[in-house]
C-alpha cells in the first residue's frame, strides 16, 4: 500500500514537472516579450522617488530633427530653394512657446533651442529633466514634424501616439486628436487621424515615442502636413505668416484642451501679433 502511494506521488510529481516545463516554454516567449516591454516602458532611467507633484501642466515641444539630420526636404514655396524640415519645425515650435508662455499653470520648454542633433533618448531625457523641475502631474512631449513620402504623393495631417497610451488615460491620444482636427480645419487639409505603429518587439515603432514612454511621458508625434506635396506645402508652409498661423493653431488646440487662461496682465492681442 505504502509503495503504491509513493508510486502515485512520483507520477504526480512527474506530471506536475511536465506541466510546468510546458508552461515554462510557452511563458518563455511571453516572458521575453514582456521583458522587452518592461525594459522599454516601465523602467525609468531618470526616475526620482518621493516627488510631490503639483497641478500645473508641462508641455515639452520637440522640434524634430536638427544638425546633420535635416528631416524631409522640399521647395515649399516654389522659389527654387530647398527647405529643410528641421528649420520649419523649429519656426513652428519657437512661435508656439512664445504664445504658450503667456498662459497660467503651464510650463513650456523646447528640447533644442539651436540647430542641434539630438538622439531620441536625449530629447526624452531633456523633457524628463524639465519635468523634474516643474513637478507637474501632467507632462506631455510633443514632437513637431512635417511629413514626406518618397513612394507616393500623400497629403494631410496626422499624429502618432503610443500603442500603450491607455496607461495615461488616453491623454496623448485626446490631445493629438484636438491638434490634428484643428490643423485639418484651419488649413483645409485631409484629416488622416491619430495612429499608432508597433514594432516586431511589440513596442512602439517610433523612437521618440518609445523613449518618452520609457520615462513615463505621454508622447505625440505631430506630422503637420506633407511638405513634399505642393498642395499641402502651399496651404501650410509657404510663408512665415502661414508657419505662424500653424503655430497658433497648435497652441490654440493645447489652450482649449486644457482650458488654459492667460496670465494676469497679459493682453491677448499683443501675444498673437
Ligand atoms: Zn520629421
Image (cartoon, rainbow, N blue to C red):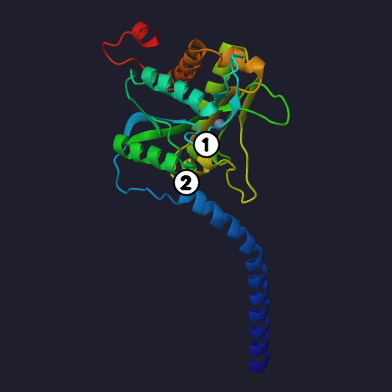
Single out the mark in the foreground, 1 or 2. 1
> Which of the pair 227/257 is nearer the observer?
227
> Which of the pair 27/64 is nearer the observer?
64
Residue hosting label 2: 214
Residue hosting label 1: 69
* Callout 1 secondary element: loop
> Which of the pair 105/192 is nearer the observer?
192
The N terminus lies in quadrant: bottom right
Q: Height in image: 213 above or below 242?
A: below
Q: Name, please, the residue furthest toward the right.
A: 152
* Callout 2 secondary element: helix
Identify the residue at horizontal 64%, vertical 61% (top origin): 29
Q: CA distance from mark 1 to mark 2?
A: 23 Å
Q: Height in image: 54 above or below 8?
A: above
* Residue 169 visible, this angle: no
Residue 118's disc is none
Find out if the beta carbon at label 1 lies less than 8 Å from the nearest ligand 1 atom. no
Q: Height in image: 30 above or below 205?
A: below
Q: Position of residue 161 (x, y in %)?
A: 55, 35
Q: Position of residue 232 (x, y in %)?
A: 63, 17
Q: Position of residue 63 (x, y in %)?
A: 47, 29
Task: Please tell me in which quadrant of the rendered image residue 60 appears.
Answer: top left
Identify the residue at horizontal 66%, vertical 15% (top origin): 231
Q: Residues within 10 Å of mark 2 (few under 14, many from 20)?
A: many
Task: Please tell me in which quadrant of the rendered image residue 157 appears.
Answer: top right
* Residue 231 visible, this angle: yes
Find out if the beta carbon at label 2 lies less than 8 Å from the nearest ligand 1 atom. no
Q: Ligand 1: give its quadrant.
A: top right
Q: Is residue 138 left or right of residue 15?
A: left
Q: Name, please, the residue furthest toward the front.
A: 80
Name which of mark 1 and mark 2 comes first in the sequence: 1
Amino acid at each position: 500500500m505504502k509503495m503504491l502511494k509513493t508510486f502515485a506521488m512520483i507520477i504526480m510529481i512527474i506530471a506536475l514537472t511536465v506541466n510546468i516545463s510546458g508552461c515554462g516554454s510557452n511563458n518563455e516567449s511571453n516572458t521575453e516579450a514582456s521583458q522587452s516591454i518592461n525594459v522599454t516602458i516601465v523602467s525609468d532611467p531618470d526616475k526620482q522617488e518621493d516627488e510631490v507633484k503639483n497641478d500645473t501642466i508641462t508641455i515639452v515641444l520637440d522640434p524634430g530633427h536638427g544638425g546633420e539630420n535635416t528631416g524631409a526636404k522640399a521647395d515649399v514655396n516654389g522659389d527654387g530653394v530647398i527647405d529643410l524640415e528641421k528649420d520649419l519645425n523649429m519656426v513652428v515650435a519657437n512661435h508656439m512657446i512664445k504664445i504658450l508662455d503667456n498662459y497660467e499653470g503651464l510650463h513650456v520648454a523646447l528640447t533644442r533651442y539651436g540647430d542641434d542633433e539630438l538622439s531620441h533618448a536625449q530629447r526624452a531625457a531633456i523633457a524628463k529633466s524639465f519635468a523634474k523641475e516643474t513637478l507637474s502631474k501632467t507632462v506631455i512631449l510633443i514632437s513637431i514634424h512635417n511629413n514626406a513620402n518618397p513612394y507616393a504623393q500623400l497629403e494631410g495631417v496626422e499624429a502618432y501616439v503610443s500603442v500603450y497610451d491607455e496607461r495615461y488615460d488616453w491623454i496623448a491620444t485626446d490631445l493629438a486628436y484636438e491638434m490634428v482636427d484643428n490643423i485639418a480645419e484651419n488649413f483645409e487639409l485631409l484629416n488622416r487621424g491619430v495612429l499608432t505603429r508597433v514594432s516586431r518587439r511589440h513596442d512602439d515603432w517610433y523612437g521618440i515615442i518609445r523613449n518618452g514612454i520609457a520615462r513615463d511621458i505621454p508622447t505625440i508625434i505631430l506630422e503637420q502636413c506633407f511638405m513634399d506635396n505642393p498642395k499641402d506645402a502651399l496651404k501650410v508652409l509657404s510663408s512665415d505668416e502661414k508657419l505662424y498661423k500653424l503655430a497658433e493653431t497648435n497652441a490654440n488646440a493645447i489652450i482649449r484642451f486644457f482650458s488654459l487662461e492667460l496670465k494676469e496682465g497679459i493682453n491677448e492681442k499683443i501675444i498673437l501679433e
